[in-house]
Image: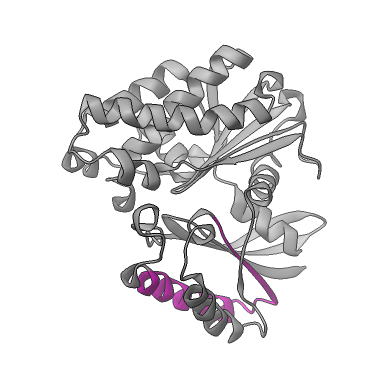
Amino acid sequence: MNRVAAVDCGTNSIRLLIADTADGRLTDVHREMRIVRLGQGVDATGEFAPDALARTHGALVDYAELMRRHDVGAVRMVATSAARDVSNRDAFFAMTSDVLGAVVPGAVAEVITGAEEAGLSFHGAVGELDSAEAPFVVVDLGGGSTEVVLGADDSDEVVAGYSADVGCVRLTERCLHSDPPTEGEIVAARSVVREALDEALRLVPVERARTWVGVAGTMTTLAALAHRMTTYDPDSIHLSRVGFDDLLAVCAELLSMTRQQRAVLGPMHEGRVDVIGGGAIVVQELAAALGERAGINELVVSEHDILDGIALSIG
């Protein structure tokens, strides 16, 4: 057994997985997520806000203490969309080096490319799925970007992948300013999403896919709402299926709600209340494209994603 820690620092959340690895399999020791909104304002300013860096630092300090407590031997932290785009990312890396280096000497965050992010997301997501349902198209819908990846199974080879520069935080900050968003704002947001996804769908042959797998918080929250859960239950959500009729109904309902109405929904994390409408638009457009191009009519959601892919890449 090799005990490792994986940290995924995205635009909206920072997540930790401490796991034992053996023979290419993971056994969870501890899994945690916090909304820190590192990418707050990045789309407009091109730099990390001091408050966002402070929130991320606080979460990472707590994660480092958990790593010590669980006697982690190796750590890998990756930063994705937000950290690719900023002018002051040196401050972010200095902070991560100080915190992680105190646990594992030399440990520091790394910015990964969209292609690397897509591959890690795919390998983390499909390991428990039946290969008879392949090829899989895995979609990791984050705060700043959306990864679309096609692969035949859980092997090391991905057929094609693309990281589209659109996510729930970026789209909300750019287009969805009213509460609830106006029809004009939704139309503008759809145009942004379609433009971003056009390139992904040109480069990734999704028409070959048989199964759509969605990962990350927007996807799992939409599934929980579609299943009419009163509280969020990750064990029930993992590998559950949602037909497009139910999925699209939930997306439309969320877009018509105020933030206050969304906040009282049982499965809704408070950090997603203001941005899940943007995520719902991305999901609507993906469902339309995958239905038309591949004849897919349901979404499979996985609790395992890029975080698991990071952990497997260490072990």
Would you say 199 lies left or right of 26 here?
left
Q: Which residues are the magenta region?
A: 53-80
Q: Classify 99 as above or below 140.
A: below
Q: Viewer-proximal residue, 67 or 296?
A: 296
Q: Residue at left 65%, top 76%?
A: 72
Q: Can the viewer see residue 220 in this picture?
A: yes
**In which quadrant of the rendered view does residue 41 lie?**
bottom left
> 23 or 284: nearer the eye?
284
Can you say whether 299 is above or below 271 in the image? above
The percent position of residue 7, horizontal first and vertical second, equals: 57, 64
**Residue 179 vertical position relative to residue 287 in the rendered view, above or below:** below
Task: Provide residue 79's location: percent of width, then percent of height.
Answer: 55, 61
Magenta segment, prevailing SS (helix, strand or loop) = helix
Q: As drawn, is 173 to the left or to the right of 3? A: left
Q: Residue at x 32, y 53 (%)?
A: 271
Q: Position of residue 203 (x, y in %)?
A: 67, 30
The quadrant of the picture occupied by the C terminus is: bottom right
